[in-house]
Image (spheres, rainbow, N blue to C red):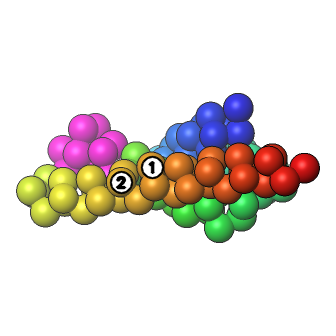
Amino acid sequence: MNWFLIVVSAIFEVAWVIGLKHSDNVLEWMLTVISICISFLLLLYLTKKLPTGTVYTIFVGLGTLGTILCEVILFDAHFSPMKMVFILSLICGIIGLKYQTSKLEAKEGDKS
């Protein structure tokens, strides 16, 4: 469940990043502020449940990935093969961190 919440918090991060650039009226700015609050409240909650460095790295990585993909899909931003290489390396890093954290949690569970 906590890993799912990291994804949810990253979705809200993407929403507020897009909102900072594209908000034009009071309602859009309010939604941007609400997204910031939800994103960071989830992040704070998750740092109490999982290793802080891992949570923050995955949060930022997924947020970056989501922001880049939204730029390309929704706002017709330029997309190059090198961007794809860097996005794939980011995804590999996120998966690796999740895997390592799961192994560490399993080891700690064996000790008790």
Amino acid on which the number 1 mark rests in the picture: Ile
- Residue 57 numbered mark, or none: none
Residue lying at 18% horizontally and 59% vertically, measured from the top left: 85
Relative image position of residue 37 (x, y in whole percent): 73, 50
* SS for dot 1: helix
Q: Nearer the viewer, residue 96 or 82?
A: 96
Residue lying at 36% horizontally and 54% vertically, measured from the top left: 92
* Range of magenta residues: 67-77
Taking the image as shown, residue 12 lies to the left or right of residue 96, namely right
For residue 51: magenta? no
Cβ atoms at labels 1 and 2 below 8 Å apart: yes
* SS for dot 2: helix
The residue where tag 1 is placed is 95
The residue where tag 2 is placed is 92
Taking the image as shown, residue 105 lies to the left or right of residue 63, namely right
Residue lying at 36% horizontally and 51% vertically, measured from the top left: 91
